[in-house]
Amino acid sequence: MFKIVSKRKLTDNIFLMDIKAERVAKSVKPGQFVIVKNTEHGERIPLTVADYDALNGTVTIVFQTVGKSTMELALYEENDYICDFVGPLGQSSEFVYESKEELDNKKFIFIAGGVGAAPVYPQVKWLNEKGISVDVIIGGRNKELVILEEEMRKVAGNLYVCTDDGSYGFNGRVTDCLKDLVENKGKKYNHAVAIGPMIMMKFTAALTKELNIPTTVSLNPIMVDGTGMCGACRVTVGDEVKFACVDGPEFDGHLVNYDEAMRRQSMYKTEEGRAKLKFEEGNTHKHGGCGCGGDK
């Protein structure tokens, strides 16, 4: 059992929790994720790590209530216990293996849409602790949906906040803000990290390709089972088939087939869609938690 040390409501349906998980806290790196189970027979919920404190043995998660399990998790309070907290899983961000000299030669721009600010934060914090100053864009549909602004200001070199409706900060989407920084503010970047909804990452990657900025995206939004068994996060990257939870969640943003991934994500939500995916993918279809009957 894992204790909820603290809980904070960030928006009407986005919550932050600090979980006591000492082993995970000591070994997790930026970019990785954990799997949470509320109860013994509960659904597996893959969540990207939003922060970690090895000294106090806590790991921070941020989640949005989009289904039954996350709605149930939101009902838990401080000092309650969840059944399982497994991790760290997935591959860590590539930059954690680069030398200080290599990092000093990079000019990073991090672009976070909505809940994407949560996985961006530990990456920016890690770089800040290494003396690397980076620029960060965080955005939401409106001011109420912008999260972790205060925390991000403490670790970012420059923070740019934008809202789709212009209710706060820069008036426009994160892509509009990035374009303004490069074309009107004279900013120069040689690496971008974009995390958020799939459609946001698709258009951000299209813009950074136009601007000739190598880009990393995190495909954590399409993960379901978190172990590579269900096949929900199957994605084509370049000419290779990958699984976000095992091979990622981070990939070259200019090589990801977003349309295929979003189509698959939509189909996966229905029984008929899962059966169609199984038929189309033949022997390459992975299963275990997808409900297609393949493990019977």
Image (cartoon, helix red, strand yellow):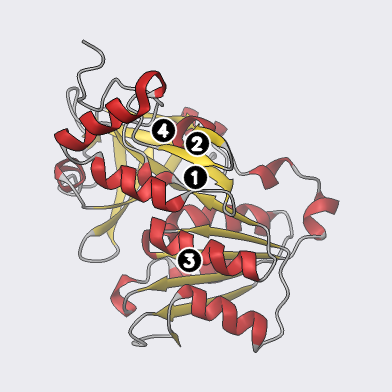
Tell me which residue sits at (77%, 54%) in the image: 103
In the displayed structure, would residue 280 be above or below residue 131? Answer: above
Q: Counting residues from the N terminus, which is met first, the one under dot 1 or under dot 2?
A: 2
Residue 216 horizontal/vertical position (percent): 59, 53
- Pick the residue in front: 267 or 168: 267
Q: Amino acid at mark 1?
A: Tyr
In 3D space, how far apart are the residues under numbered discs 1 and 4 (Cα atoms)? Answer: 10 Å
Task: Write down the residue under mark 2.
Answer: 25
- Dot 1 or dot 3: first in sequence order is 1
Residue sitting farthest toward the right: 101
Residue annotated with mark 4: 21
Identify the residue at horizontal 45%, vertical 34% (top origin): 245
What kind of element bears circle 2?
helix
User: Residue under circle 3?
Assistant: 203
Mark 3 element type = helix
Give the mark, 4 or 3, whose residue is nearer the N terminus. Answer: 4
Q: Which quarter of the picture shows residue 188? A: bottom right
> Viewed as shown, does residue 108 lie left or right of 225?
right
Q: Amino acid at mark 3?
A: Phe
Task: Report the front residue among 114 and 270.
Answer: 270
Q: Can residue 96 be seen in the rendering of this structure?
A: yes
x, y percent for residue 223: 36, 39
Q: Are marks 1 and 2 in contact (CB under 8 Å)?
A: yes
Residue 26 coordinates in the image, percent (x, y): 55, 33
- Height in image: 260 above or below 181? above
- Find out whether the residues at labels 2 and 4 contact each other: C-beta distance under 8 Å: yes
Q: Quadrant of residue 269?
A: top left
